[in-house]
Structures are given as C-alpha cells and as structure tokens.
Image (tube, helix red, strand yellow):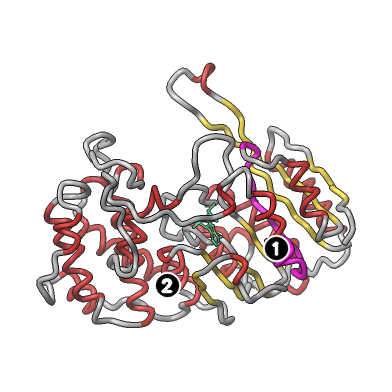
Amino acid sequence: MSAGTAVHLQSGDDIDANTVKMSRELRVLPGNSGAARREVLTSAEVLERAQRFPRLRYMGSKYRLLPHLERVFAQVGGTTAVDAFSGSGVVSYLLKAQGFQVTSNDFLNFPSVIARATVQNSSVRLDDETVETILGPPADDRDFIQSTFDGLYFTTEDRKFLDSAWSHIDRITGYKKDIAIAALVLSAARKQPRGVFTFTDSTRYADGRRDLQLSLREHFRERVAAYNAVVFSNKLRSQSLRGDVLDIPTRAPDIAYLDPPYAPPRDDNDYIKRYHFLEGLSVYWRDVKIMENTKTKKLEKRYTPFAYKRTIENALSGTFEHFKDAGAIVLSYSSNAIPGEERIVELLGQFKSLVEVVSIDHKYHFGTHAAATRRDVSEFLFIGRDE
Ligand SMILES: C[S@@+](CC[C@H](N)C(=O)[O-])C[C@H]1O[C@@H](n2cnc3c(N)ncnc32)[C@H](O)[C@@H]1O
C-alpha cells in the first residue's frame, strides 16, 4: 500500500470543460483498458437508453449525473462492474447499457428487486394477461394494507388495490414477479407526495400533479409498461444481490462503483425512515417489523455505519479494502458531508496509488429568496486506480 497521489481536477462553472480536462487525465493513465469496452452503442445512445429508466425519486439518486458517470466508466473501461449501493438502480442499468457484466447490490429489498427486474433480467416482460389478472378482482380476502395503513397513506380504493395486487403477485414467480413488485413500488412512490413516507397528511404537499391524481391501479398499468420497455440483453449475465456491501463476493471487478449514504454533519440520512412503506410493500410486510408506536408505522431502522460521523471513516476504509483488487474504485460523495475531500483522498490512497478527484457543481435552491438561500454544493467523484 502506498500513499495516494491526488490528481486534483478543480471544479469550474462549466462542467463540460471540467470533464474534458478530466478525460485527458484519464486517457493518459496506464492500465486504461478502455479499448476492451464491449459496448457498441455510442455514448449518446447509451445515455438515451439509461435516461429511459423508470424514475424513482430517491435520496442521493444519480439520474442527474449519468453523463458524468458514463464518461468515467467508459474511460476506465473493462467488462465487469459492481454497483455496491444500487438504490434506484439507475447506475446499475447505465453500466449494463454500457456493456458491463454488472453485480448490483443494496442492503434494502426493494432496490434489489428493481435491479433484478431490469439489470439481471434480460428478456422477460410482464405479459398483458397477467397485468389484467393483477388489476382484476382479488384472488383472496387479505386486507393487511387496508387495515394497517387506514387513514395514513393513500385512499381506501388504493389500499384495497395494493392488497388485491399482492393476492395475485403471490401466485407468480421469477422475473414477472420482480417486474410486478417493482411496478407496485414505483406506483406507491409516485403517488406519495415528495415520494417519502415521513408524514401521513397527504394534503400537505398536494399540488395537483398528475402523479398524485392517478389511482394506484392506473399507475400500476403505466409503471409495468415502463419497466417492460427497458428490459434488454447486453449478452452478459448480470446479477442483483441484497446484502451488506462487505458481503459482495465480486471483489475484483474492473470497476467498483460506490455510492454510499453521505454522512451529514447534521440531520440524518435514514433511508428506512423515508422509504419504509416501499420496503414493506416489496415483501408484503413479511419478515419485517413495524414499530407500532410510530405515527408513520415505519419499519425498524436499518443500521449502517455510513450514516454517522463517528463510523463513516472506518466504513469507507473497510469498503475500499474490500475492493482493493478492483481495476478502479469510483466513489460518489458530496462536499456537504463528512469526511471532506482531502481525507477521502487519503483513505482511498491507502489502497490505490493514484486518486483523481472530479468535482461536479450543483446549485441547490432553498426557499424562495434566491440570493439569500442559494448555495453551491459539489458532488465529487473519486477515482482510485493503481499506477
Ligand atoms: C446514495 S444511495 C445510492 C443511490 C443510487 N446510486 C442511485 O442512483 O439511486 C445509498 C444506498 O446505500 C444503501 N446502503 C446503505 N448502507 C448499506 C450497506 N452497509 N450495504 C449495502 N447497501 C447499503 C441504501 O439502502 C441506499 O440505497
């Protein structure tokens, strides 16, 4: 292990200029196996495909950064990639579109179902007949969702539909089941104002958007069509895992992409608090524990060392070590989080001799008074490789 040499690519107002600079740096690096890239699509075609991925509003999702990630992944090159914290699944899907054999992973269930339906699955679609059955009369008289979440989320009709849909989903198997669950999860996420389940008064953020007006039944039909439309094969066998990052068996892929939760200086970063309903829905609340004393009926918190100031450095270090034999470790991290950029370079440099930093500027707006509330936040990409 040697200390990392940081090639710092300074952020600029012009992201493209910044990225061009980065490309030049990346191209001259030894060991760049870009030529081995199998993808026959152009970057523009890859991006067009990835941007069609059904959109889940998810904390920290990388939809906006797809062009930057595409460029970095293409320049690093290779044939195998791990997306260790897959979340919405869009980066795993981008990697698949780029021609990589992808190992997608998340410790929550619903992200792993979405990735199974869209990344691992290369050919199966949910047929019209099964869709009509799921939308038809219930197969049994279950009412868990209707009774448990009465007065908390959605209309009576919507909750009835969720129970009824599951009465059929329980009778199907394989990728069809994964697409059905993914579509149900995305329906619920789209219909919930702001896509989070931290409050129960749905009138609070109701703004008349179409997504809030459609019934869950109508959503489901559309969301199945959207997932069916993105099923494709890149000729390689990708897989979707559900588990802790340190249990991922693929330890030496060409690219290990890491997008862990960002440890915020204040506040919290709890995915379960925001998305407990989606997690529960993805397993029909089997083998999960609702905290009955909570107003939102959330599930028990899922501990992750990435969410806390005290444990984040060890968690990052342990993850870098786990993937130290990867061709490249690519880490997404926010400049608004802990630890800071220099410390991350130091930590990654313990396992990879050359560390590059790319900063991508974003403008976030808070409130309505632009001048007083606007601030710049950078999203970093750290690229660690062996010289
Ligand atoms: C920033 S999000 C990933 C977003 C994703 N790249 C996207 O574009 O949607 C972080 C993810 O890490 C997952 N996670 C947190 N701790 C984990 C752990 N120890 N092992 C595996 N996944 C974990 C969370 O469930 C969450 O989905």
- Is 25 on the left-hand or right-hand side of 220? right
Q: Is residue 175 above or below residue 340?
A: below
Q: Residue at x 14, y 61 (%)?
A: 160
**Mark 2 crowdedness (10 Å alpha carbons): few <14, some 14-19, many ≥20:** many
Magenta span has 224? no
Locate residue 176, reporting x and y percent: 34, 78
Q: Amino acid at mark 1?
A: Ala
Disc 2 marks which amino acid? Ala
Q: Is residue 138 left or right of residue 85?
A: left
- Cβ–Cβ under 8 Å for marks 2 and 1: no
- Residue 303 % position (x, y): 50, 55
**Side of 26 where 169 appears, left or right:** left
**Magenta run includes residue 323:** yes
The residue carrying mark 2 is 117
Query: Between residues 58 and 286, which one lies in front from this camera angle?
Result: 286
**Would residue 378 be visible to someone looking at this image?**
yes
- Mark 2 vs mark 1, CA separation in Å: 24 Å
Foreground residue among 377 and 360: 377
- Magenta stretch: give its range: 320-336
- On residue 192, which mark appears? none
Quarter where residue 142 is shown: bottom left
Residue 118, x across and y down, in percent: 45, 70
Residue drawn at point x = 45 percent, y = 73 percent: 116
Q: Which residue is mark 1?
A: 74
At label 1, counting other C-alpha atoms closer than 10 Å, the crowd grade (few under 14, some 14-19, many 20 or more) is: many
Asked which secondary structure carries label 2, the reply is helix
Q: In which quadrant of the rendered image does the N terminus lie?
A: bottom right
What residue lies at 25% left-to-right and 37% top-to-bottom?
206
